[in-house]
Image: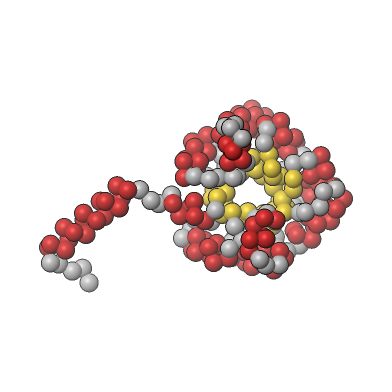
């Protein structure tokens, strides 16, 4: 499963990328607001750091305007994935932009039928939002499972990009289901390494090593 990092924090992206933990980046208007930087400037900087897809989202709501914004965003770098909302206008824009050979990430997916439409419109990625479904007492993992089955049934090449990842358990669960990609904030990715038994074991090893009185260097 590929790891995308959901942030516009350049320092965090660079750190995780150097560890080989970044296969791509996702952003949205809320993330750009949090970064406090110009969208074109910060997106270009991210694209220079990361080799994989960098999702940059349009803010228009009509198809023609989405297409125009998508073309401008795609011109930033060859690894831009234009992020479009899952509306009829978004699907129209997806059809045009994907037809031009641009990567498209269709976002704000909350049903399997929406995911089916996105795949038929040529989306490179579909972004089902797990956490937001959990927030309204629905199981976001069921949605990932349904999309996986449908895409496999018909050979759709659209990649399932599990989004709105809130916990380390979400990461395990979507990997087990077979999501192609997951995107999560830097802090969630960092937490994947943590386990109390690892910490306890290391503490024991270091304590015993100190008793030997030896040094390696």
Residue farthest along the left direction in this orientation? 212
Q: Is residue 144 visible in this depiction of the protein?
A: no
**Residue closest to the eye, 37 or 21:** 37
Residue farthest along the right direction in this orientation? 64
79 to the left or right of 67: left
**Residue closest to the eye, 206 or 73:** 206
Look at the picture and state if 55 lies above or below 10: above
Q: What is the x, y in percent for residue 120?
A: 75, 36
Look at the picture and state if 51 lies above or below 147: below
Residue, x 12% and y 62% (percent of image)?
A: 211
Look at the picture and state if 93 lies above or below 209: above
Q: Quadrant of the C terminus?
A: bottom left
User: Could you say which quadrant of the image residue 180 lies in?
Assistant: top right
Q: What is the x, y in percent for residue 148?
A: 60, 33
Residue, x 48% and y 52% (percent of image)?
A: 189
Look at the picture and state if 85 lies above or below 73: above
**Residue closest to the eye, 140 or 23:** 140
Residue, x 25% and y 51% (percent of image)?
A: 201
Residue, x 16% and y 63% (percent of image)?
A: 210
């Amino acid at each position: 499963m590929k790891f995308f990092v959901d942030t516009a924090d350049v320092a965090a992206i660079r750190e995780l990328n150097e560890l080989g933990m970044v296969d791509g980046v996702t952003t949205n208007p809320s993330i750009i607001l949090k970064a406090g930087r110009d969208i074109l400037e910060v997106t270009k900087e991210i694209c220079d750091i990361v080799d994989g897809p960098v999702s940059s989202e349009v803010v228009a709501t009509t198809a023609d305007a989405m297409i125009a914004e998508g073309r401008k965003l795609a011109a930033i770098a060859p690894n831009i994935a234009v992020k479009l909302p899952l509306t009829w206008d978004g699907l129209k824009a997806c059809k045009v932009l994907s037809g031009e050979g641009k990567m498209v990430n269709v976002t704000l997916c909350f049903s399997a039928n929406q995911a089916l439409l996105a795949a038929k419109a040529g989306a490179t990625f579909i972004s089902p939002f797990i956490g937001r479904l959990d927030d309204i007492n629905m199981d976001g993992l069921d949605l990932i499972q349904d999309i996986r089955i449908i895409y496999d049934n018909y050979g759709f090449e659209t990649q399932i990009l599990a989004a709105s990842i809130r916990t380390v358990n979400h990461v395990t669960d979507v990997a087990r289901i077979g999501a192609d990609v997951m995107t999560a904030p830097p802090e969630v990715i960092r937490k994947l390494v943590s386990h109390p038994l690892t910490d306890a074991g290391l503490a024991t090893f270091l304590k015993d090593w100190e008793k030997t009185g030896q040094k390696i260097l």
